[in-house]
């Protein structure tokens, strides 16, 4: 047991990073539990998770879930519990969750949600996306949610509540901070999973969807996203698009930014992995981003969870690096 020195953290983060989960399966231990708190999930959350498991069918057939799990572990991340639900179950699942004060499941965006209190990810089996692009369009969303769930900053109040300190880089304090970094991390991994696992037929499908005659030899090829006037708004590698569509996640621009930052400073990636379970890792991430540009971490951390925030952060990154790395 030891105190964590917070001196080199940005001011706003100091209050929020006080503890870390104790060593578990070889995780480092630098842990001091504040009074009245515990890392043990209260019974009511365990019961709720069990009820969800009992009442909602897990629809993972036809998905390569072992491949997803291996991918997450191969990145050095711990694996969380998850539930794949189909569209028929989404109302029932939402009503169970909302009756206990939780947010309903996500049926828009990409259909995934991570519930840190329950240490559970829910991923919608989005028929529309699966039909056009195959199971990889669902598997990539599993990777995204499981990436969030690798955050080990869960603390519970001894009287049975949850202390929402942070999920990885994100904290709900005030308007919230760190979403750009947290969502970017999850999206970067989802895109990497797609890149590693698409077939040649998938690549042909991508080419066809995006209106290219040429076969793509790599999903690292960068597309330009233009507005109605034909001006380029931002760029994005093909691996971020849902296969068979011209759509990508709202947070994909943040994913591309994180990817470029990791290319620019190779020390950043190992720091990111360390930061999932260690406050010292969080400080290393901040330092490594600021080695690229001294004001960049503060800028990126401030962006809100919205389309504008994700795109602006991508442009901040490109400016700091001095161009698009592709
Ligand atoms: Zn996310």
Image: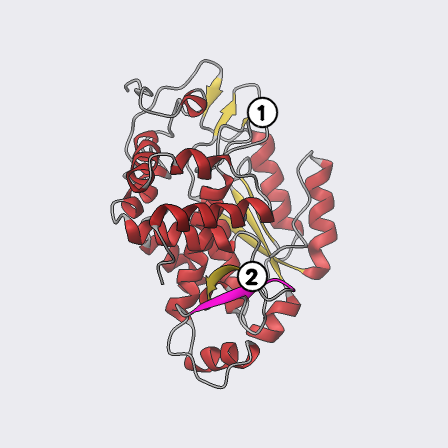
Instruction: Report if the beta carbon of the residue with label 1 is closer than 8 angstroms to ligand 1.
Output: no
Q: Nearer the viewer, residue 253 or 228?
A: 228
Please give the residue where the numbered disc 1 appears in the rendered image: 161
| Vertical placement of residue 309 versus 177, above or below | below
Crowd band around label 2 with a 10 angstrom C-alpha radius: few (<14), some (14–19), many (20+): some
Left or right placement of residue 323 versus residue 223 in this view: left
Disc assigned to residue 248: 2
Whether label 1 touches label 2, CB < 8 Å: no
Residue 224: say if magenta.
Answer: yes
- Outermost residue on the top side: it is 35
Left or right placement of residue 113 versus residue 268 in this view: right
Q: Residue at x 41, y 55 (%)?
A: 189
Q: Nearer the viewer, residue 292 or 230?
A: 230
Q: Residue at x 43, y 55 (%)?
A: 256
Magenta residues (range):
222-228
Percent across and percent down for residue 151 are 43, 39
Crowd band around label 1 with a 10 angstrom C-alpha radius: few (<14), some (14–19), many (20+): some
Left or right placement of residue 167 versus residue 53 in this view: left
Which type of secondary structure does the marked residue at label 1 adopt?
loop
Image quarter in which the C terminus is found: bottom left
Residue 84 in view of the camera? yes
Q: Residue at x 52, y 19 (%)?
A: 158
Which type of secondary structure does the marked residue at label 2 adopt?
loop
| Vertical placement of residue 160 versus 205, above or below | above
Residue 64 in view of the camera? no
- Outermost residue on the bottom side: it is 213
Percent across and percent down for residue 30 are 30, 26
């Amino acid at each position: 047991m030891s105190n964590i020195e917070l001196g080199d953290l940005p001011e706003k983060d100091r209050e929020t990073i006080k503890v870390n989960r104790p060593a578990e399966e070889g995780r480092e231990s630098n842990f001091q539990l504040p009074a009245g708190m515990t890392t043990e999930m209260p019974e009511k959350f365990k019961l709720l998770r069990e009820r969800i498991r009992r009442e909602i069918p897990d629809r993972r057939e036809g998905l390569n879930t072992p491949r997803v799990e291996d991918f997450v572990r191969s990145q050095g991340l711990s694996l969380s519990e998850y539930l794949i639900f189909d569209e028929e179950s989404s109302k029932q699942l939402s009503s169970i969750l909302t009756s206990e004060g939780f947010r309903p499941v996500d049926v828009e965006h990409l259909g995934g949600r991570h519930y840190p209190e329950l240490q559970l990810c829910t991923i919608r089996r989005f028929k529309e996306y699966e039909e056009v692009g195959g199971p990889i369009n669902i598997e990539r969303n599993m990777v995204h949610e499981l990436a969030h769930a690798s955050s080990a900053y869960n603390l519970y109040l001894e009287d049975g509540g949850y202390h929402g300190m942070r999920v990885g880089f994100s904290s709900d304090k005030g308007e919230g901070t760190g979403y750009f970094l947290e969502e970017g991390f999850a999206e970067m991994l989802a895109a990497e999973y797609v890149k590693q696992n698409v077939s040649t037929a998938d690549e042909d499908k991508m080419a066809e969807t995006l209106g290219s005659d040429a076969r793509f030899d790599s999903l690292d090829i960068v597309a330009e996203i233009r507005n109605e006037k034909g001006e380029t708004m931002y760029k994005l590698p093909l691996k971020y698009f849902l296969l068979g569509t011209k759509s990508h996640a709202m947070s994909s621009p943040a994913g591309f930014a994180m990817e470029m930052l990791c290319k620019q400073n190779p020390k950043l990636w190992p720091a990111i992995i360390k930061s999932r379970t260690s406050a010292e890792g969080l400080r290393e991430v901040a330092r490594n981003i600021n080695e690229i540009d001294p004001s960049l971490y503060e800028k990126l951390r401030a962006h809100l969870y919205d389309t504008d925030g994700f795109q602006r952060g991508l442009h901040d990154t490109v400016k700091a690096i001095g161009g698009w790395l592709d």
